[in-house]
Image: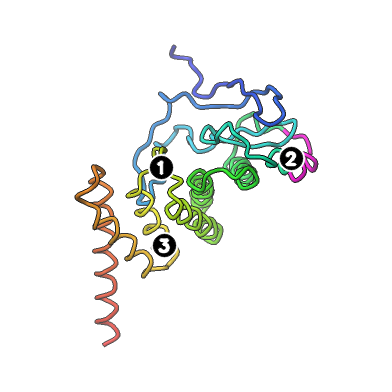
Amino acid sequence: MENLDPIFDRNVECPLCKTKFTSKKIRSKFIKVERYESDFCPIYKEGHVNGLLYNIYVCPDCGFSFSDDFSKYFPPGTKEEIINKVSSNWVPQNFGGHRTIEDAIKTYKLACYCAELKKEKHIVTAGLYLRIAWLYRLLENIEQEKRFMKIAIHHYYESYSTDDFRGTQVSEVRILYLLGELSRRIGEIDQAVKYFSMVIERQSRTVETKIVDMARERWYEIRDIQKQADVINE
């Protein structure tokens, strides 16, 4: 047991073309998170594998890319759309081995494109875009991090507006908090305040008190910064 490899080969079947392939996954016992940032980005303990790198499966045969969160159902016409726009242009390549951050970003971008074509729920697509932003943060690429945060905000808003998060592990309070925190991080402060306020208003109707506390902390931080700016401008 001492020599157990943290990363193993998982057997996968492509939902689109039914090709069987292997993709690396991390044994859960080896995923060690030191802390989470204010937008829930996990910071892994030094020397441990980054759990974000192996979430996406990429079919080496047809290019269809997906995560465990994708539904098995393909709405009418979407298979043909993916075949036309992904598979017909696919240059066979294999992402089934060990991945760098850059490799992982490629797999997430492929999965985002497939998710859009497949008409996956906005809550699923939002999570993919947010993880791309987190990976760009690791590369200290602020411009791309913010770019993908903006796309994630769009999908979280659509998910909230259409209620497509119902029945998933993501709650309304968490979506509103993320809308606030991502808005804050890209500099849309008025929007951030609005969403944080909406979280705080729901404090009596949620068991996720930690998220309410986080929203309140962010709200106070913004208020203090604005007060300091007002003093400087006087």
Badge 3 element: helix
Task: Give the CA distance from mark 1 to mark 2.
Answer: 28 Å
Q: How crowded is mark 3: few (under 14 residues within 10 Å), some or many (20 or more)?
A: many
Badge 2 element: helix
Residue 221 on the magenta segment: no
Q: Nearer the viewer, residue 56 or 19?
A: 19
Task: Give the CA distance from mark 3 to mark 1.
Answer: 23 Å
Q: Residue furthest left?
A: 204
Task: Give the CA distance from mark 3 to mark 2.
Answer: 36 Å
Residue 16 x %, y % = 68, 31
Q: Magenta stretch?
A: 84-93
Using the rendered view, name the quadrant where residue 206 is placed.
top left
The amino acid at mark 2 is: Glu
Q: Mark 1 points at which residue?
A: 166
Residue 79 x %, y % = 70, 38
* In the image: residue 211, left or right of residue 41: left
Residue visible at 74% across and 34% down?
A: 62
Q: Name the residue under label 3.
A: 183
Position of the C terminus by quadrant: bottom left
Residue 96 x %, y % = 65, 29
Residue 45 x %, y % = 39, 36
Badge 1 element: loop
Residue 87 on the magenta segment: yes
Q: Are marks 3 and 2 in contact (CB under 8 Å)?
A: no
Among the two numbered marks 1 and 2 on one chain, the one whose residue lies closer to the N terminus: 2
Residue visible at 65% across and 34% down?
A: 58
The amino acid at mark 1 is: Arg
The amino acid at mark 3 is: Ser
* In the image: residue 216, left or right of residue 85: left
User: For residue 80, which numbered disc appears in the image?
Assistant: 2
